[in-house]
Amino acid sequence: MSRIKKIIIFLYNIIYGFIFCLLNGSSNHLECKGKIIGVKIRVNGKNNRIIIEDGVSIHKSSILFIQGDDNLIYIKQGSIMNEGGSVRIEGNSNRFIVGRNSSLINVFFSMGDDKTDIEIGNYCLFSANVIFRDWDNHSIVMANAPDVRICEGKSIKVEDHVWIGYGTTVMKGVTIGHDSIVGTMSVVTSDVPSNSVVVGNPVRVVKSGVSWNKEWLKSTCG
């Protein structure tokens, strides 16, 4: 993309929306080819990168926050983050990646350890108030060794074409297989097989061999 086009997009965002962008530290990089409106971006540390590809739309009080070094937020072409939500990275050498043409409504992502990833595939659909956590937020220690943390962050992967229902929580160390459906208010603590429907706390498989369509099709159920 030419320098002039980048300037035009940046000015458009300033004129038609609210952007709060604060890059502290050194060698931090923001590259935005999409449209961001009502977004707060704050980066502390060094060698962090935020890349927002062409066709991405982020708006309505979303927050991108990095506290640490060598982290990456990468949102690929055509994806949407709206009606709030945030990405919060507190650590070093972490990666948050959203694939192409995924839609996230008020989703909260929390990454707090080092060298972990949250990776969302292509054509995913997440309903409101979904939470992803790849760490435990506070230290878990042994009673006889209160200064030694025994919990660690673990990466989360969501494969292509996954539908996650309202209010679901996705915990560290899980993979959600492609074409799966996670029911409303579920808690995902273990891997979800591809082409399955899972529900509950913790989730259990209630149907296999399925996929889903974003379009509202005519039902054949009697």
Image (cartoon, rainbow, N blue to C red):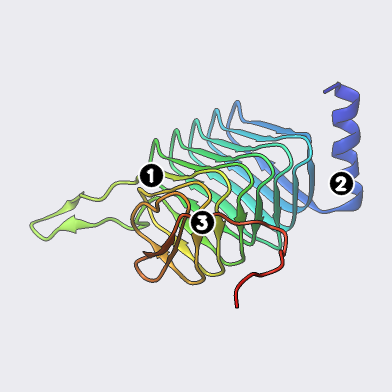
Give the alpha-carbon distance from disc 1 to disc 3, as whole Å.
35 Å
Residue identified by numbered label 1 = 113
Which amino acid type is shown beneath numbered disc 3? Val
Point 11% across, 61% down: residue:
143
The quadrant where residue 32 appears: top right
Which amino acid type is shown beneath numbered disc 2? Ile
Front-most of 76 and 62? 76
The dot on residue 210 is 3
Q: Where residue 146 sits: x, y (%)?
A: 16, 56
Point 86% across, 22% down: residue:
3
Q: Is residue 101 left or right of residue 88?
A: right
Question: Which of marks 2 and 3 precedes in the sequence?
Answer: 2
Q: Is residue 171 above or below residue 178?
A: below
Instruction: Give the SS element for disc 3.
Output: loop
Quarter placement of the C terminus:
bottom right
Q: Is residue 143 left or right of residue 106?
A: left
Quarter placement of the N terminus:
top right
Point 59% across, 59% down: residue:
107
Classify mark 1: residues with Cα within 10 Å, few (<14), some (14-19) or many (20+): many
Q: Where residue 129 sits: x, y (%)?
A: 57, 67
The residue at the far left in this view is 144
Residue identified by numbered label 2 = 14
Q: Where residue 112 sits: x, y (%)?
A: 42, 48
The quadrant where residue 216 appears: bottom right
